[in-house]
Amino acid sequence: MNNEEKKYISIGKIINFFGIKGEAKVGYQNQSQIKNASFVYMLDDEKKPKLEVERVRFGKNFAIVKFSGIDDINDLIQFKGQRMFVLKQEALNKLDNNEFLIQDLIGCLVYDDNEQIGSVVAVSSNGTQDLLNIKNMLGQINLVPFVDEFFPVVDIKNKKIQIKPIEGLLS
């Protein structure tokens, strides 16, 4: 990813078509990012077009997105398999005070009381919830559900996360 692309975050990928009227079937990890997007950028495309989101509705494990000016399957075919991006600053502006971007968790140090036990190296999903991939001091990675009970304090600004592990969670 070049410096220009660092201003953007990926919010989904066009995995297929939905019907013949130009709607896209989109895979995503964060429903609110898809729902709040006014415009998306197709950075995988050589021309890097900006598309206006006309409407979004949700299926079982995907979003159905209609873009302005794309009215049939032939207009959409060029974007199949491409990732959709939004400007990172626009996404940040739409967050509440206690919200943050999941990708901002990567690199945070994880503490149990005042003892550093590792750092977040990735965030994945099991389909139900986000999982923090925490690399401990021995280099082992533990997958921990990102829920309030386990992570009472998340300080994105200072890149610190407090964990309250239950027995066996980090072994």
Image (spheres, helix red, strand yellow):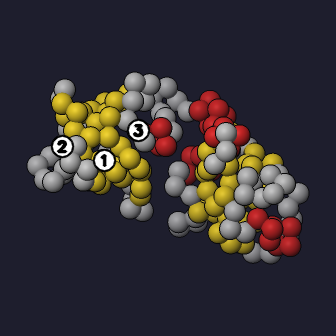
Q: Quadrant of the C terminus?
A: bottom left
- Residue at 67% over, 49% down: 85
In the rendered view, tell whether residue 24 sits above or below residue 163: below
Residue at horizontal 63 percent and vertical 40 percent from the top? 6
User: How busy is the neighbourhood of tag 1: few (under 14 within 10 Å), some, or many (20 plus)?
Assistant: many
Nearer the viewer's eye, disc 1 or disc 2?
1
The tag earlier along the polypeptide, 2 or 3, is 3
Please, what secondary structure does the residue beneath circle 2 have?
loop
Q: Nearer the viewer, residue 27 or 170?
A: 170
Q: Position of residue 155 (x, y in %)?
A: 38, 27
Q: Residue at x 64, y 32 (%)?
A: 89
Residue corresponding to mark 1: 134
Q: Is residue 94 visible?
A: no
Q: Earlier in the sequence, mark 1 or mark 2?
A: 1
The residue identified by callout 2 is 165
Residue 156 sits in quarter: top left
Compared with 21, 158 (above or below) is: above
Of the numbered discs 1 and 3, the one sitting upstream in the chain is 3
Write down the residue under mark 3.
107
The mark lying in front, picked from 2 and 3, is 3
Residue 20, horizontal then vertical, whole percent: 80, 75
- Residue type at tag 1: Ile
**103 sits left or right of 47 in the view:** left
Report the side of 73 relative to 156 (left or right).
right
In the rendered view, tell whether residue 12 sits above or below residue 115: below
